[in-house]
Structure formats: C-alpha cells, structure tokens
Image (tube, grey):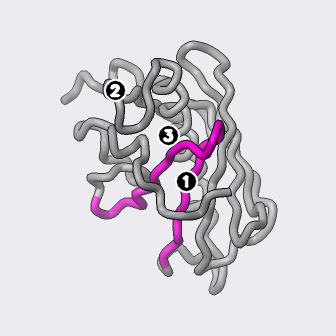
Amino acid sequence: MVTEKIIHAIQDDYPSDFAWCFGCGRLNESGHHFRTTWDGNNTITTYIPNKEHTAIPGFVYGGLIASLIDCHGTGSASLALHRENGYEPGVGEEPPRFVTGSLQVDFLKPTPQDVPLVATGTIEKIHPKKWKVLTEVYADGVVSARGEVLAVIMPESFTRNK
C-alpha cells in the first residue's frame, strides 16, 4: 500500500467549473482537497485529518470518513473511465466527471486521529454510465471503514445553469 504524497491526481485535471466539491475540489479553499490516483490496478487517496475532524478526543469524525469514501469513489470511477478511454491522469482529454448515485459506509472500528488515512479502491463497471467502487479506509495499517459508491457519469443537467 502506497502512503507517500500523490504527485498527480485525477482531480488535478477536472475543469475549473467542476473543481469546487467540498471533498475533492482543488478550488474550494475550505474543502478537504482529497486527491485520487492509481496504485497498480487499484486506486488510492491519502489524507491526514485535521483537529477539527475530531469526533471525540483521539478519534476521527465519521462524516469525514464518509466524505473520503464518497470522493474516492467518484474519483476512482473517473480514473477508470479515463483509462478505458486511453488516458492516464495528466494525459489526454479532460477526464469524465462522476456524481454519487449511492453511498454506503460501514464503520468497523474507531479511526485514530493524527495518522494518515489511506483509502484504497477496487472498481467494477456495471453499466456504461455507472461504476461501483469498493473502498477500504486504513489508519495505521488497520481497516477502520469500508464503503461502496455507485458512481454515475455527471448528468448533462449539471452543466445547464452555468
């Protein structure tokens, strides 16, 4: 499992109009700035929670973990379709954008504060416009949460009100 800093993430390639997500938008100054890339045939996002992400002293708030799984899922789907289209992060055309069709999170054990969280994902294409991403979140090498995201290609209606 890779834990070093991600050099180039799929979110780096999202167009400015769609880079505002609180979880993964690079242009949202208040956001988390989750960044997702390949780790072999799986995907990876690393993140170090801040003190304000505390549930109770010493442990991470579950909402942050759910956000991590959510954005990791949509970013992973974008990576997978971008690769299917013949490209890698930083190469080729603008990557496809996905939104969350569903999110399921199972909290397996308390997640300790002050350690990097590593989300790893496996991807399954279930329809040309829908991808399922299974994610495990590790803290200190131990799985603390698992989740599943059904990621859907961003609907055309999201671009109409610009």
> Where is residue 144 drawn, in percent x and y?
75, 63
Amino acid type of the residue that numbered disc 1 sits on in the rendered structure: Thr
Report, in whole angstroms, how far the alpha carbon at label 2 lies from the one at label 3: 17 Å
Which sits in the foreground, 42 or 101? 42
Report, in whole angstroms, how far the alpha carbon at label 2 lies from the one at label 1: 22 Å
Tag 3–tag 1 contact (CB < 8 Å) = yes
**Residue at disc 3, secondary structure:** helix
Amino acid type of the residue that numbered disc 2 sits on in the rendered structure: Gly
Residue under label 1:
45
Report, in whole angstroms, how far the alpha carbon at label 3 lies from the one at label 1: 9 Å
Question: Which region of the structure is painted magenta?
Answer: 29-50
Packing grade of label 3 (10 A; few <14, some 14-19, many >=20) is many
The N terminus: image quadrant: bottom right
Q: Is residue 133 above or below residue 52?
A: above
Which sits in the foreground, 139 or 55? 139
Packing grade of label 1 (10 A; few <14, some 14-19, many >=20) is many
Residue under label 3:
75
Q: Is residue 155 above or below residue 145?
A: above
**Residue at disc 2, secondary structure:** loop
Residue under label 2:
92
> Is 101 situated left or right of 15 in this image?
right
